[in-house]
Image: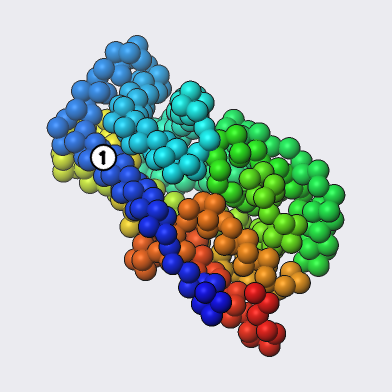
């Protein structure tokens, strides 16, 4: 094995099977959701659901919009619950999850409520603007949506994530000191590093840069902190700092803003087209029975743009990796941390090209290791592994 480069290791049949099942699960879930929206529209059931919502909402428009969204989300949940349970059992079967069924069920309930709350804010805003400005609603809706998006990005680490996980400031002096050295070298400052208690639910390891402004922070899973050497954790920290230095969150918000603007324009065009050509049983765009059509525009757009957005994300990840190579003393801990992560998360080191191109937000482990080896060779040093 000594002559085989570390980046060319093969995937175990177990890792291949696990990732294949997960992919099919995701695709099936997506297809069922898509078909559900189409069926609602072509059968006229959406109109029937709107009438039910009006009765439940006591003929009040805003309340009826909420009732419609509530019914829609409940039905979607019921349709998708089989996939959710299968996904939970899959993680257990491959010993990647430590979560008990009750705890998982509680998370599902909380997830549903959070989704309902956020969905309500978005949908009420949408139909408010549609009612007030039927022609130009989409511009104002887009602006409001982006404000919401930025607020949410800022609040997520302090309000949203703690609903599902516990966090506490990192109390490891050595690591804190290393981060300060890394940050000073980068001429930047990060507000904090937090220990993310992932082990209560999962055996997988993870790390991320989250938040905006005062909530900007690096979160490191305890499953990583407790099993990796200080040098390996420093390599992971350097990667996350790379995202910060390259302003990836800010840039992603700009990309999101452009896509969302196009999305709102497309939604407006589609709604008007459907009404003008009497495609479905709604006669004006403020009739919220057209919500499945809006959702369909978003779904199709996300699907079409998925490869491009993933490619953009992989570009950012490569940039963060390069930043890590440059800021740590040796790439050896980067390589060993990647290998540990792949094993621990049962990730595919070498997925099929089309799989990586279509679905992966990160370059495959084999490519990341190859990039590290190439970088080291370009430095004229001998590989230290
Ligand atoms: Zn990253």
Rendered position, 361 above or below 284: below
* Residue 103: x %, y % from top left: 51, 26
215 or 183, which is in the foreground? 183
Estimate how packed mark 1 is, as few (under 14), some (14 to 19) or many (20 or more) residues with alpha carbons within 10 Å.
some
In this view, 83 is above or below 10: above
Q: Describe residue 52's horizontal placement relative to residue 23 as left or right.
A: left
Its colouring scheme is: rainbow
| Residue 278 shows up from this direction | yes
**Percent of width and height locating residue 236:** 66, 59
The residue tagged 1 is 32
Quadrant in which residue 60 is drawn: top left
**What residue is shown at x 37% (from left), y 24% (from top)?**
70
Q: Which residue is at the far front?
A: 1
Q: Is residue 192 left or right of residue 150?
A: right
Instruction: Residue at 62% x, 51% y: name it.
Output: 208
In the image, what residue occupies the spot 61% across and 40% down?
198
Q: Residue at x 52, y 58 (%)?
A: 342
Report x, y in % for residue 46: 23, 29
Seen in the picture, residue 373 relative to 83 is either above or below; the reply is below
The answer to whether the beta carbon of the residue marked 1 is less than 8 Å from any atom of ligand 1 is no
- Residue 139, how many percent across, how many down? 44, 47
Q: Secondary structure at mark 1?
A: helix
For the question of whether residue 291 can be seen, the reply is: no
Quick check: 303 left or right of 206? left
Question: Quarter of the image containing the C terminus?
Answer: bottom right
């Amino acid at each position: 094995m000594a002559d085989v480069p570390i980046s060319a290791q093969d995937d175990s049949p177990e890792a291949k099977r696990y990732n294949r099942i997960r992919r099919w699960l995701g695709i099936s879930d997506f297809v069922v959701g898509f078909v559900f929206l189409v069926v609602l529209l072509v059968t006229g059931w959406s109109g029937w659901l709107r009438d039910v919502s009006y009765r439940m909402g006591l003929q009040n428009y805003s309340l009826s919009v909420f009732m419609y969204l509530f019914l829609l989300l409940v039905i979607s949940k019921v349709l998708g619950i089989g996939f959710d349970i299968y996904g939970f059992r899959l993680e257990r079967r491959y010993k990647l999850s430590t979560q008990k069924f009750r705890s998982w069920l509680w998370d599902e309930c909380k997830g549903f409520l959070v989704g309902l709350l956020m969905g309500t804010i978005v949908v009420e805003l949408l139909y408010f603007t549609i009612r007030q400005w039927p022609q130009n609603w989409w511009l104002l809706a887009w602006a409001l949506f982006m404000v919401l998006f930025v607020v949410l990005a800022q609040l997520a680490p302090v309000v949203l994530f703690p609903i599902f996980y516990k966090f506490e400031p990192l109390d490891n002096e050595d690591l804190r000191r290393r981060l300060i050295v890394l940050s000073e070298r980068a001429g930047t400052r990060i507000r904090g590093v937090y220990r993310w208690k992932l082990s209560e639910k999962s055996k997988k390891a993870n790390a991320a840069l989250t938040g905006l402004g005062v909530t900007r922070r690096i979160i490191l899973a305890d499953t990583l902190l407790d099993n990796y050497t200080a040098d390996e954790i420093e390599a992971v920290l350097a990667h996350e700092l790379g995202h910060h230095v390259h302003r990836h969150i800010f840039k992603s918000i700009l990309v999101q803003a452009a896509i969302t603007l196009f999305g709102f324009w497309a939604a407006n065009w589609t709604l008007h087209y459907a009404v003008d050509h009497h495609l479905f049983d709604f006669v004006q765009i403020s009739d919220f029975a057209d919500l499945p059509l809006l959702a369909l525009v978003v779904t199709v757009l996300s699907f079409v743009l998925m490869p491009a957005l993933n490619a953009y994300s992989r570009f950012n990840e490569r940039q963060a990796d390069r930043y890590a190579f440059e800021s740590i003393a040796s790439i050896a801990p980067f390589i060993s941390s990647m290998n540990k992560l792949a094993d621990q998360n049962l990730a595919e080191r070498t997925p099929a090209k089309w799989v990586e191109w279509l679905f992966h937000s990160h370059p495959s482990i084999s490519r990341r290791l190859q990039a590290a080896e190439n970088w080291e060779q370009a430095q004229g040093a001998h590989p230290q592994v």
